[in-house]
Amino acid sequence: MKVRRTRLETLFDTYAKNLALVKQHPFIEMRPDLDDIVICPICLLYFDRNAIANHSITLEHIPPKTLGGKPRTLTCYECNKLYSPLDEHLRQAVSNKPFLEGLPGGSISVSVQMKDGPGFKATVEHVNAVDRTFLIKNNQKISQEHFEKIQQNLERRNAVEMTIRLRTLPKSSQSVNLVRIAYLLLFSTFGYGLIFHPNYIMLRKQLHNPKSEILPNWGLVEVDSQNFNNEFMGVNIIYHPSSICSFLIVFDLKTRSGIVSRHAVILPGPGRPNDSEIISSLQTISDEKSVNIKVYHVGNRSHGEEFAQPLLAYDIWQELNEKSEHTRVS
Ligand SMILES: [Zn+2]
């Protein structure tokens, strides 16, 4: 418990310091202008240091803790809690992936209802994807009475009839969560200086209302994550072609049982194009089989020089835009 609180305090210091630096910029005016506060990156509410003791500000794991995340930033209690059920959906979706892709050993949790018998939770495992043989493992204790019933059925008919129910997970809740992970990873890399840019207003509105479709496609641009090796991990900036000039955030989700799934999310940068422009450009070029992109790799650094230079994201962006213009002309 003590360790957890210390991490919270350290992160509070880091973000309060970053905010104080960002506020010094002549174009940024904050009302009320308070010292030693942090702002929740999702809802933009202010929190002073008392928020640590009264738990209204919380450690935010990126990605979620159950998917291998580390406490990298702070969000308010409400914004953190809003995603608890969605984190569980995402964890289940990652766990189910090997099974749904027909990989040997892939398994999935289901509810089983025996005909004239008990219902129980079970795991279905691929034994052989080619001839579609599955192994059903019962995860619950069955009473002696029910066990005998199953045995009797087997003796009588050499078969047991059962209905297997698989819970389908809403794709939208997974998409919005992937966008949230990417946005928070971006925030933990560049701090408040970046997310105060107007390009993130609609994105935050979407994250704050995960059930409504506010951004096209919930803001998620499907990118084939297989194209990105370890060199792309973390934050990248696509600077060419200029029509999709954007952040490309690559991260892995890892379940406790060792399933790893790589994701790549595109988010707007502090300039043109914005979210909808990027999405429509990508749709236009998706007819071509592949697009050559040029990328600047920022990586997974956090709270280092980016935080000491609170507007560094803009400088890098500007420099790369000039490079992109140059590439286009030549
Ligand atoms: Zn919040």
Image (spheres, helix red, strand yellow):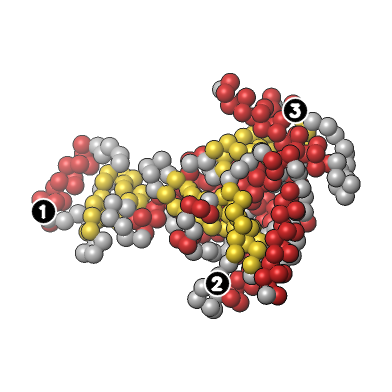
Q: Residue most toward the bottom? A: 287
Which quadrant, please, contains the N terminus? top right
Q: Which mark is residue 156?
A: 1
Q: CA distance from mark 3 to mark 1?
A: 70 Å
Placement of 226 over or under 34, stated as above or below: below
Label 2's element?
Answer: loop
Task: Name which residue lies at 31% across and 46% down.
Answer: 122
The number of callouts visible is 3
Task: Name which residue lies at 58% across and 36% down.
Answer: 71
Q: Which mark is residue 49?
A: 3
Amino acid type, label 2 = Val
Lower position in the chain sequence, tag 2 or tag 3: 3
- Residue 112 visible in the snapshot: no
Q: CA distance from mark 1 to mark 2?
A: 62 Å
- Residue 250 visible in the snapshot: yes
Lower position in the chain sequence, tag 1 or tag 2: 1
Placement of 60 over or under 206, stated as above or below: above
On the image, the x and y values in percent for residue 53 come to 69, 24
Label 1's element?
Answer: helix
Placement of 85 over or under 225, stated as above or below: above
For disc 2, the neighbor class at 10 Å (few under 14, some 14 to 19, many from 20) is few
Task: Name which residue lies at 74% across and 26% down.
Answer: 50
